Amino acid sequence: MAETDFWTGSERYLCDRELAQSFHIARTLGMPLLIEGEPGTGKTELPIQYAKDKGLELFVYPTGSKSNVEQFVARFDHVKYLRDSQIEILNSQREEKGLKSRLSTGGRNPEKLADYVAKGPAAKAYSTPNSVLLIDEIDKAPREFPNDLLYALSHRKFIMPESNEIIEVSEANMPAIVITSNREQELPTAFKGRCIYHYIHFPEADTMREIIAKHYPKVEDRIVDVALDVFYHLRRIGLERSPTTRELLNWLKYVKNYSTSEAVDKIQKLEGLGTLIKTQTDLERVQQKILNNPMDFNRRSTPN
């Protein structure tokens, strides 16, 4: 029976009420949860932290421009099958000549086609009750990829290539499936219709403070205050690529090793700017703003 408890996060992951509700509904109905939102909002971390917290097996498929159903579900190894078939012929010839030694096929039998089916993350997840399957950044895949998944999502089964073995799960035993998208391209309507949908909005400062506390509970409030002030200021000035939660956490991981006064000074001076800014244009823009309006980046550096 699939895990359908109402999961609200863990010591390492903050799952807000609306996201927790969507995730709960998806698991209860045996449907995938499709999460959209800008990068760095914790989409990928949800299934990873859920599997870790619950002690469940996790299968991950990172999608890309060459993704296809064969990689995702299973593929038939024609080369290995042909080689083993030739070995069987050679073994027969050796036996006719009275030779006792045999060439090895590694325990595979060409008469059993299932021996040559290499299962991908989807087939493994469907074969493992109470598991978790992450399809990460599906918007990077060719458009036919989500369309090709419609049958499997609707019927909860895969048919293995060549061997025609059927891997099927009930609604109750459906793995917890999370699909993430950064909305680089619009997904097919029919595909979305097979999923429970949730959009993660970028967290406000209060929520971000809670996220930071999950990761670095011992960081001084003063450091967090100044870092958040700078972080959200950078997000407001219209950069090509605004800094994300992940990048803020990396920045804090660096500065937290210093004393409070040293850390505040480093934040004020934007030391380690490359942790937050990822394009040359944005870097030049931020540096120009610092020269013109230095107080914009250190408003919290002076005690109230």
Image (cartoon, rainbow, N blue to C red):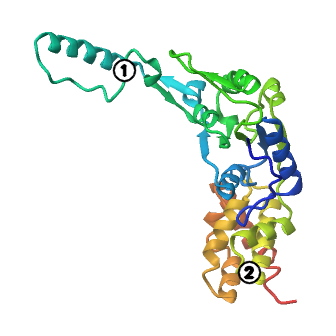
Residue at image coords 83%, 79%: 299
Q: Give SS at disc 1.
A: loop
Q: Give SS at disc 2.
A: helix
Q: The N terminus is located in which quarter?
A: top right
Q: Position of residue 206 (x, y in %)?
A: 86, 69
Checking the image for residue 223, the label placed there is 2
Q: Position of residue 120 (x, y in %)?
A: 55, 32
Front residue of this view, candidates 195 and 86: 86
Q: Position of residue 274 (x, y in %)?
A: 61, 64
- In-image side of 31 versus 250 (left or right): right
Q: Position of residue 105 (x, y in %)?
A: 30, 25
Q: Which residue is mark 1?
A: 109
- In-image side of 18 versus 168 (left or right): right
Q: The C terminus is located in which quarter?
A: bottom right
Q: CA distance from mark 1 to mark 2?
A: 63 Å
Q: Is residue 195 above or below residue 207?
A: above
Q: Amino acid at mark 2?
A: Ile
Q: Is residue 24 above or below residue 15?
A: above
